[in-house]
Image (cartoon, coloured by chain):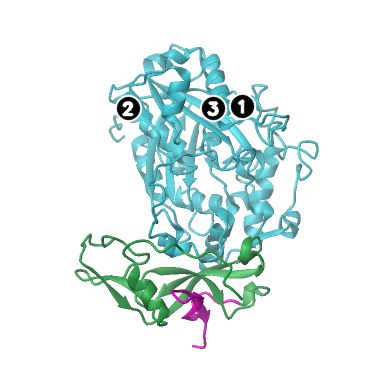
Chain colours: A green, B cyan
Amino acid sequence: MAYNKPVPRKGQHHEPFWEGAKQGKLMVPRCNDCGRVHWYPRLICPYCHSMNLRWDEASGEGRLYTYAVQHRAFGGWGEEAPYVTGFIDLAEGDRMMTVLRGVDASKPDEIQIGCKVRVEFEKVDDETYIPFWRVVEE
Amino acid sequence: MPVAHELSRAAAIVGAAESNEIGFTPERGLRITSLQHHIEAIKNVSDYTGIPISDIDGVFSAGWSSELAEHLGLRPSYIDTTSVGGCSFQIHVHHALAAIASGIIDIALVSHGEAGRSYRGGGGRGGGGRGEVSPAELATAAYGTFGAPSQYAHAMVRHMHAYGTTPEDFAHIAVVTRQWATLNPRAVMFSKETDPNGGPITVEMVQNGPMIAWPMTIAHCCMVCDHGGAVIVARPEIAMSLRTNPVWIAGAGESMGHSNMVEMADFTATSAARSSKTAYEMASMGPQDMDMAMIYDSFTITAAITAEMLGLAPRGRGHTLWKEGTAAPGGSLPINTNGGGLSFNHSGMYGMQLLVEAYRQLSQTAEDGVNGIEGKQTDSQTCIVNGTGGTLSTTGTLILEA
């Protein structure tokens, strides 16, 4: 079935992210001066304000920071509701949003903040893959 | 005593008014536009204070200032159109205080008009290049959130995890806020007659309502309807010459943590800790000096976290102000005496509603026949007002004094 949910528009300067995603790699921006990873991508490091940035492949591992269960949704997501959304603390630092996989939206009390998650990619088309995070065994 | 900050009490709010019809306004052929809400409120506050519109020399609004000034035929000396969500209006008062204290202007208009229901999306107006792609799209666009409730629910879950709170704890905020709304005939949820879901509610009713974004049922969420409001801020000599009771700006502060929620460091803390610290210091007052509070309650969790940030309750215990009745009618720290964004009126940006009620309470006009009946007027002499904009993003705090 064709992917029927919103897709981020491909803005300038983010080609490494989309190229990496095609190969199943999570690419994140890192500052060459202070060494910190940030998300979402910036034109300048939000920590030390260096413009000397690069793209690094992240481990694809993280921990669940918080979550919620979406009952009101529209379009393609409306067909999946209820589903769990969450924020992921990356092993490399900083945070990403996701629709969380590997959980039961009807049992939100059973989802554990701090649990281990791993990234996976869903295909939109040959040029576009989107990262989502799945709860995995410790 | 510490030396008073030079901005403290350098200006006063000298009047507040609303547009003629607010809430879920009747749709008779022509809907009331956001501009009409602005203009009616401006005319009403001018009539109320006796200040001619032509005397206004500073215009403050969330994106509307050039259109409003043109519509009114004004040639202002100070134009501020800060549009950072529902706290914009607290920030406008902060800026107006500074502009008046510095001598640039004498009389500032802060105006709000938002047909949030009738013309959805017509309230705040911001800048931004057309067609450009913000890199922030990568952060959220793909991930199934739809509007504020879908985002704020994550903060409630984190608070529950961090402090052992429960959805029922937060439901008390909706229940107590509704108690205030049943004292305010202009509140959407005043009674079953004003709205099918109006009138008193219980924790069980809150928890058994339709789920919007777990753990928030619909009564944990504010409404979206229509509102216009305006306040006039003036220098002391003018404030003392009017027929209205001045409400002094004892302290003001603003700050922000982020714009996009993915950048929020701690989902149980907002920049209100910083904006209120600035305001308290300017006022030479602290949380213990506050007689009441007007706190943006976009969601029950917003009110709880904000109460903690303002120092009105310890971290993790904000909800107890409502659960234990402190914030309720007759309580020792009344909060959201108009019925809040949860039950009075919320048009998308709620900061003006906070200001109007704070002015009315401290000027002893909360039972003026326009927006109150017996029981709603408190004897408060001080009020802390805190707006929160975006997704727990930006905050503006005012400390007002009768």
- Judged by its main secondary structure, the magenta piece is strand
Q: Earlier in the sequence, mark 1 or mark 3?
A: 3
Q: Which numbered mark, 1 or 2, is in the foreground of this view?
A: 2
Query: Can marks 1 and 2 be said to lie on one chain?
Result: yes
Q: Residue B38 carries which label?
A: 3
Q: Pick whichever, A135 or A79, lies toward us.
A: A79
In the rendered image, residue A118 lying in the magenta stretch gets the answer: yes
Q: Do the residues labelled 3 and 2 touch (CB within 8 Å)?
A: no
Q: Mark 3 to mark 2: distance in Å?
A: 22 Å
| Residue found 28% across the figure and 33% down from its top | B3
Left or right of B389 on screen, residue B277: left
Amino acid type of the residue that numbered disc 3 sits on in the rendered structure: His
In the image, the segment drawn in magenta is: A111-138
Of helix, strand and loop, which one carries label 3? helix
Query: Can marks 1 and 3 be said to lie on one chain?
Result: yes
Q: Mark 2 lies on which chain?
A: B
Q: Do the residues labelled 1 and 3 touch (CB within 8 Å)?
A: no
Where in the figure is residue A124, as x and y percent of width and height? 51, 73
Q: Residue B99 carries which label?
A: 2
Q: Which of marks 3 and 2 is nearer the N terminus?
A: 3
Amino acid type of the residue that numbered disc 2 sits on in the rendered structure: Ala
As displayed, is residue B331 above or below residue B368? Answer: below
Q: Residue B366 carries which label?
A: 1
Q: How crowded is mark 2: few (under 14 residues within 10 Å), some or many (20 or more)?
A: many
Q: Pick whichever, A77 or B23, lies toward us.
A: A77
Of helix, strand and loop, which one carries label 1? loop
As displayed, is residue A111 above or below residue B290? Answer: below
Amino acid type of the residue that numbered disc 1 sits on in the rendered structure: Ala
Residue B36 figure quarter: top right
Q: Is residue B324 visible?
A: no
Q: Pick whichever, B384 or B199, lies toward us.
A: B199
